[in-house]
Image (cartoon, rainbow, N blue to C red):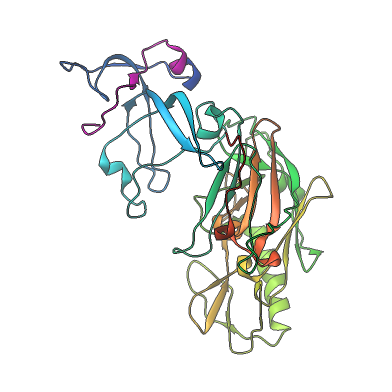
Amino acid sequence: MNRYNSSTYKPGRCGSPPCLAAKVSDCAYCYSTPPKPGCSTNTCILNPKNTITGVAASEELSTDVVSFKSTAHTKTNVPRFIFSCSRVGLLEGLPRGASGMVGLGRTTISLPSQLSTPKFALCLPPKIKSKGVVIFGNPPYAFYPPYNKKKSIDLQFSYTKLYNNPVHPSAEYLIGVTGITIDKKRIPISPALLSINNKGDGGTKISTIVPFTVLESSIYNGLKQAFSKGVQAMNVSKVAPVAPFTECFSTEFLGYTPTGPFVPEIGFVFENKEMYWELYGVNSMVEISRKVVCLAFVDGGAGPRTSIVIGSHQLQDNVVEFDLAASRVGFSGDLINAHAGCDGFRPLDVRKSV
C-alpha cells in the first residue's frame, strides 16, 4: 500500500454501506499522520486470500474509482469499487507478473457483482503462451477462426441451474450433474454422491483453481475402468502411471484428430436432460511427453466435501458463461470443433460492456 497513490481512494468506515455490502463488522484502528491507504482509523476489515497457496491476510476495506476498457474501445468507470490491498508476500505462488487476484465468486463484492450486469464469460487457454479472456456484461461473444477474421462463430450455449449449499454457504459455483458417460454410456454412480446431503457433502462444482477434475473414489474408479477399456480396445497400450494420474497410455498407436487424441468421449449429464457437455481428447487427456498421455482426471479419495470438482483443464477452449442474476451457468462446447480457440476473441463495436 505504500506505493498506492489515488486522489479518489476512500477507506471503508465501520458501518458504512461498503462495509455492510461486504458483510464485515470487524473494525481496526491504524494510526498514521496523515492517514494513508491501508492505514486509516475506524475501518472495517477484509481478509484477502491467495486461493492457490491458502495464505490469507487482514487488511482494511478500500474503495476507489476503477476503469474498465470496454469492447467498444471506451472506458467504463465503476465508482466506489470495493477491494483491499495487501503485502507483496501474498502474491507468492502466482504467475510471474501477477499483481493481485480478482474474485469471481458468488459474493456481494465479487467483481461481477459490483458491475451493472452481474454476468461474465470465461475462456481459459490451453497453453501458457496463448491468450484467454474474461468478458463481463452482455457484449457479443465474438470468437473468430484463424482463417476467417470477418465472420465470428455462432456460439450455442446450453444452460444449467446454479445451486447453493444449504449447510455450508459459500461463493462456489455448484451445478447439478446427474451422470457421467463414456461414449454416451453411463458409468455406475451412486445417486447419493451427486446431490448435497444433510451434512453439506456431495454434488458438483466448477473450479478454476483445481487444475484437473477431481472425482470421489468410486466415481473415479468407474470412469477409469470404462475409459481404459475403451482406449485399449483401440489397440493403444497402457503404460506406467505418472502421478497424480493413474491411467496413462503410449502414443505409439494413438490416433489424433483436430480435437486432440482419439479416445473415448467423456460426457457430463445434467438434471435438465437437454444439457449435455462432452469432452474430447484435448480436454480429457494431458500430454506427459511425446510418448505418453494420461487421463486428466484425479482420484479425490473417499468422502470428499464435493463429489465432482470440474477443473480448469477440462474448461480450456470452452466459453463458460456465469449468469449470477439468472442463477445459471452455460457451456458453449469446445471452440476447437469450430476451428477456433480462446485467443480468437475480438472486441466488436458495441456501446455497453458492463
Residue 253, by quadrant, is: bottom right
Where does the image place residue 205, in percent across and percent down from the top left? 62, 45
Q: Is residue 74 something one can see in this rendering? A: yes
Where does the image place residue 85, in percent across and percent down from the top left? 32, 32
Q: Give the residue at x 32% y 45%.
A: 91
Of residues 175 and 70, the one nearer the viewer is: 70
User: Is the magenta region chiefly helix, strand or loop?
Assistant: loop
The number of numbered discs placed on residues in the rendered structure image is: 0
Q: Give the residue at x 15% y 15%.
A: 33
Name above or below for residue 51 compared with residue 125: above
Q: Which residues are magenta?
A: 1-19
Where does the image place residue 278, in percent across and percent down from the top left? 73, 61
Q: Quadrant of the C terminus?
A: top right
Q: Is residue 4 magenta?
A: yes
Residue 228, by quadrant, is: bottom right
In the image, taking residue 282 as reference, residue 43 lies left or right, namely left
Q: Give the residue at x 42% y 10%.
A: 15
Of residues 30 and 26, the one nearer the viewer is: 30
Of residues 210 and 290, the one nearer the viewer is: 290
Residue extending farthest right? 273
Q: Give the residue at x 38% y 34%.
A: 48
Where does the image place residue 271, in percent across and percent down from the top left? 80, 45
Residue extending farthest left? 33
In the image, taking residue 174 as reference, residue 313 lies left or right, namely left
Q: Quadrant of the N terminus?
A: top left
Name above or below for residue 233 compared with residue 152: below
Name above or below for residue 35 compared with residue 316: above
